[in-house]
Image (spheres, rainbow, N blue to C red):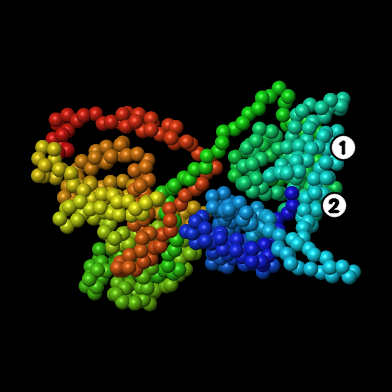
Amino acid sequence: MSESTPITESPEIRGQLSRIVASECFRRRLKLLDLFEYLAKETIAGRAAQITQKRIAAEVFGIKKSKHSQSNVSVRISASRLRDSLDEYYRKEAQPDEIRIYMPPRYYFIAVEKLKEPNYSGLTSQTDGFEQSFISPKRISENDIIGELGVAFINKLFLEMGFLWFPTRLEAGIDGYVEVRLDSGDVTNCIIQVQSKATDRPFEAETSSGFEFRCSSRDLDYWLAGNAPVILVRSRPKTNEAYWVSLKDYFSDPARRKSGRIVFDKLKDRLDDSAKPALQRIAIPATSGLYLGTEPKPEIIYSNLLRLASFPTCYYVAATEYRTPGEIFATLREIVRNPFGEWVLHSKMLTSFHDLSVTPWTKVCDRGSVEELNTNEWAQSDDPTRRKQFVQLLNACLRAKLYRKGVKFSRDNQCYYFRATQDLSEREYSYQSREHKASRSVFKGYPKRSDHTQMSYYRHSAFSARFVRYDSTWYLQISPTYHFTRDGERISLFGPNLLSGMKRLETNQAVHGQVVMWGHLLTERNLFESGPMFLDFSSLLQFELGVGLDDDAWLKREETDKAAALEAPPIDARQESLIL
C-alpha cells in the first residue's frame, strides 16, 4: 500500500471539495466545515508539512492563550470528527465514481486516494519526424512503486521462512495470503492474511527502539471483521526493515481499538526467521470450522447534551454594597421597568456579561472598581470554585433567556416549565422533530373524575438543566420532566405521585421527543424576541455507532410486556379522594 498523497490544485479536486462542503453530512457542522476548508486551502497551497495542532487551534478555533494540552485535545477531537464525517459522506452520499478525499491518521492535511486521469484526447507531439498521438497516458507514481517494493520484500521474507506467499492482485485491504509450510515440507492449508504498509521515509514517531502507526477506523473495521487472522507489516524496503503485528490480538484491548494506534518494538516485532513460531501459532487451526460474524448494523445514538456554541468574549466584575439579589432588583426597578437578570452576586461582588460601567448598573455597583476580564480563561479554568461561579452566571443567563420565551423557573422543583396561559386553556408548542414538523401539549388541565367542572391539577412540560464541560466544550444537559400545579401557579401537593405515574409509563421515544422539543426551543431564533442573547446553543450532540440492534426483532413485544408490568394498580377510595 502506498503513502497518502496531499491534494493539489485542479478542477477535479475543487469540484469534489465543493460537493463535500454542500453535502448533508456537513450542512450543520459549521466548526468542522471551518476546519475542513482551512486544511484544504493549506494543503493545496503546499503547506501540508507546516500544519500543526498549535496553528489549527489559533487560526481555526481562536485558541491562542489556552494551555497547550487543552488546545491539543480540542484539535485532536475535531480532527477525529472530521475523519468520521468524511467517511460518513462517502458511505452515505457519495457516488461510486467520485474522487475519494480523506484526512490521513496522525496527519492534518487533506489527501486524495485516487485521481481521475486527465483527458489528453486530441493532443499530439512530434518525435523524430513522426507524429505520435497520445490519449489519456497511464502513469505509475513513485508511491505505487514503493508499495510494490514492500510487497516484493514481504514475499522474499516469507519464502526465506519456508512459507508460501500468494498475492491478491485485486484487493480492498489485504495484499496477500501466507500459507504455513512445515519444516518437513508438508503444507497445512492454514493461512494468514497480510496487509502491507511500505514507505521510503522515516516511520512515525520513530526512535532507535520503536515507532508508531495509526490505522483508520475504516481499515480496522475491514481487517477485524473476517474469520482469518490478519497481520500488518510496516516496512522500509530500501533499508531491509520489516515489522509485523497480529491485528486481532493487538486490538482485542478496547482502549487500543478506540485509539487505532500501533506501537512497534523494533526488536520484538521484526519480521524475520525469529517470527516464524509466532506466525505458526496465530494461523488458523486445521480443525476449526468457518465462522461468519453477523452483518454490522450502524446506529445513531442521540444524547441529551446541547452544545453551548458561543458566549460573550468578556465579562465584568464590580464591587457593590448590596448584600442580597432582592435589594439589587429593587434598586434597578426604580430606574428601568424590567431589569435584566443576567448577573450573580457573591461576597458583595457583582459579576455579569452586562457592561457594569454604564447605567443602570452604576447605581448598584462602584464604577471605579469595574474590571473587564476574558471569559474563555474563566470557562476553561480547572479551579472548582471558579467553575462553579461560571456555571452560576450561565444559569442566570439561561433563566432570563427562557423567561422571555414563556418558560419559568421553579426554585422548589429546580426545573424550567412552560408558563400557564392567561385563561388556563391548553397550550401547544410546535417544533421541528428529527424528521418532520410536530406539536406537543405543554400546558393542560385535567378535571376531577367526580366533577368535570372543577380542575384537579394542571400539567406543565418541564426539564431540569445542568451545565457540564467535557474536554474544553460546555454543554447543557437536558433532563425532561413535568411540573404540576393546582391553578397554573401554586404547586400541586400530589405532584410527586403524579410525576411518578408519568415516568413509569413514558417510553424512550416520548422522552426523546421532549429532549428534541426543548433543544428546538433553546436554539430557535425569534426576530421579535427582545433582550440580550448572551447564550447561543448548537444542535443536540449525537454519535454514530458501527454496531446496533435490530429494534423490529424485539421492540414490539418488549413494549407490550413493559406496559403490562408497569400498569399501576387501581387506587382505593381514600387515595382517589386525596388526588381528586
The type of residue carrying mark 2 is Lys
Q: Secondary structure at mark 1?
A: helix
Q: Which mark is residue 160?
A: 1
The type of residue carrying mark 1 is Glu
Quarter of the image where the C terminus is located: top left
Nearest to N terminus: mark 2 or mark 1: 1
Q: Which residue is at the far right?
A: 128
Q: Residue at x 49, y 53 (%)?
A: 470
Q: Residue at x 42, y 67 (%)?
A: 312
Q: Quadrant of residue 500?
A: top left
Relative image position of residue 226 (x, y in whole percent): 65, 35
Q: Secondary structure at mark 2?
A: helix
- Count of labels shown? 2
| 142 vs 472, nearest the viewer | 142
Above or below, 174 against 116 in this view is above
Q: Quadrant of residue 352?
A: bottom left
Structural crowding at the residue carrying mark 1, measured as other residues with C-alpha within 10 Å and reported as few (<14), some (14–19) or many (≥20): few
Position of 32 with respect to 524 (left or right) is right
Q: Which mark is residue 466?
A: none
| 374 vs 159, nearest the viewer | 159
Structural crowding at the residue carrying mark 2, measured as other residues with C-alpha within 10 Å and reported as few (<14), some (14–19) or many (≥20): few
Marks 2/1: CA–CA distance: 18 Å
Residue at mark 2? 238
Q: Residue at x 19, y 56 (%)?
A: 421
Relative image position of residue 378 (x, y in whole percent): 46, 63
Relative image position of residue 149 (x, y in whole percent): 82, 49
| 360 vs 3, nearest the viewer | 3
Above or below, 147 against 155 in this view is below
Q: Residue at x 19, y 30 (%)?
A: 571
Q: Quadrant of residue 321?
A: bottom left
Position of 12 with respect to 124 (left or right) is left
Q: Are marks 2 and 1 in contact (CB under 8 Å)?
A: no
